[in-house]
Structures are given as C-alpha cells and as structure tokens.
Image (tube, grey):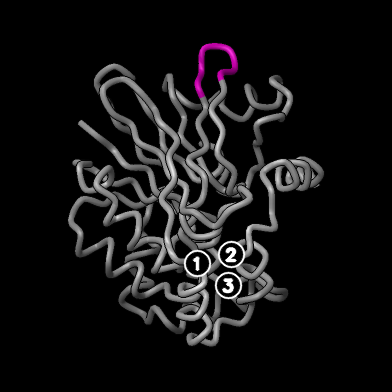
Amino acid sequence: MRVAALYDVHGNLPALDAVLADPRCRAAETIVCGGDLVAGPLPEACLDRLESDGRARFLRGNGDRETVTPPDDGALAEVGAWAAARLGPERLARVATWPATVELDLPGLSGVVFCHATPRSDNEILTSVTPEADVAAALASASADVVVCGHTHVQYDRCVGATRIVNAGSVGMPYEGTPDARWAILDDGAVTLVSTPYDAEAAFAVLSETGFPLLDDWYGAVFRGEVTAEEATAHFESRRGA
C-alpha cells in the first residue's frame, strides 16, 4: 500500500496539481493531506481537487483551524477570514470536521501516526535539530513507531528513541532553497522524501490574480528560492516555546 503524504499546500493549486500529476503520486492508493491545505490563495480549488480525487484523508492544521475560526487580530486573522470567504459555509463545515491525527497500519512500518505538527498540538514546533528530550516529550502520547508531520515546511527524517519522526515538507510553500513541491512517500516499509518541480513563476502569476492579502510576504521569497532549510530551521528553533 503506497501512501502519499502531502502537507502544507497553503492554497497553492499549481503546486498541488504538479504533485497529483507526478507518476509517484498517481501510484499511491491513499493520500494523507496533512493540514494547512486551505490557508492560502486558492483554498476552495485545492479542497475541491483533493475531495474529487477520492483517495484523500484529511487532518487539521493550525491554518485550517484558523480559517474555520479566525483569530481576533493579526495577519493570521486576515488570512483566515479571507480564505473562509473563498470556501463558503459548506466547505468550511467539512473542514471543521477534520481530525487532529490519522493513523494507518502500513506493511513494514507497523503503526504510523500522521499529524500536522505533533500528535498533541497542531502548532508545536519540532525541527531536525530540536533536542531529543523535547522531541521525546512531544511524541510521548503517540502509540506508533513512525510519526509523520509538517508545519515547519522543511523535510527531515530522524529517530528519537524508538520513534521515527518524518517531516514531509511543504507542497505549496517549501523552505528548501527552491520552490519545488516537497512531499513524502510511504511504501513497502520505506519512507522516502521527494520533490516535484513545477513552473513557480507561472504559479505566482496565477496566485497573484486571486487578491490574496499576503502573497509576496508568504510566497515571493519562497518562489525565488531565497529561503534555505538551514535559515528556516534556525528561525523555527528560535520560536520554540515562545
């Protein structure tokens, strides 16, 4: 059973379409959408695309939660309200039902828990360099050998004690030095971190037409390949516990 883990699409439909067209993703029996699908420029189109695909299982990210119930103020309030208006009440009602985790038994991997950030929080920060004691505490409630997460938009694969934690990266807004969509494949006992190239310049033009309020702040530097994994990891580590 092949599973494609697609995280942090952030309303970037051209990136999502590129991954869905990738033969490696087409070969998957199941797609786990790991959260933060709808916080972005084309939320309704991304949701419709995955729902119509028929293979997707959805879980909630902090961006999805903040779209269903936007914060009172700040940039996330603006993004949440904007995306909620694009989705409309029927789609929002479906997003509101998404669980915090998805659990699958996969051949060769035993129990796998998919979550957005950690099994106990959709907003907790874990990176490739987070101290092992902090990682172990965050994963203590997970009754699985493998935890697949996202949230920080940087791929990594590490073991802490008996638990393997894999960050699938971001399809729509990767902090990896190039705009190529990042995602993960779970198949035949293996977890593989992969990427799919696409035309980011054309994608930016498409997203620009939506009127998304934070387009350049969120996507400009990413699409230009100006954000590296090392810089993003250091930034997220500085925010842990803040």
The stretch of residues the image draws in magenta is: 159-164
Residue position marked by numbered label 1 in the rendering: 200
Q: Secondary structure at mark 1?
A: helix
Residue position marked by numbered label 3 in the rendering: 70
Q: Residues within 10 Å of mark 3 (few under 14, many from 20)?
A: many
The residue positioned 21% from the left and 50% from the top of the image is 55
Q: Secondary structure at mark 3?
A: loop
Labels 2 & 1 near each other (Cβ < 8 A): yes
Whole-angstrom CA distance, mark 2 to mark 1, is 6 Å
Residue 236 % position (x, y): 73, 45
Question: In the picture, which quadrant includes the N terminus?
Answer: top left
Mark toward the start of the polypeptide (3 vs 1): 3
The residue positioned 29% from the left and 55% from the top of the image is 20
Residue 172 % position (x, y): 49, 60
User: Which residue reaches farthest top?
Assistant: 162
Q: Secondary structure at mark 2?
A: helix
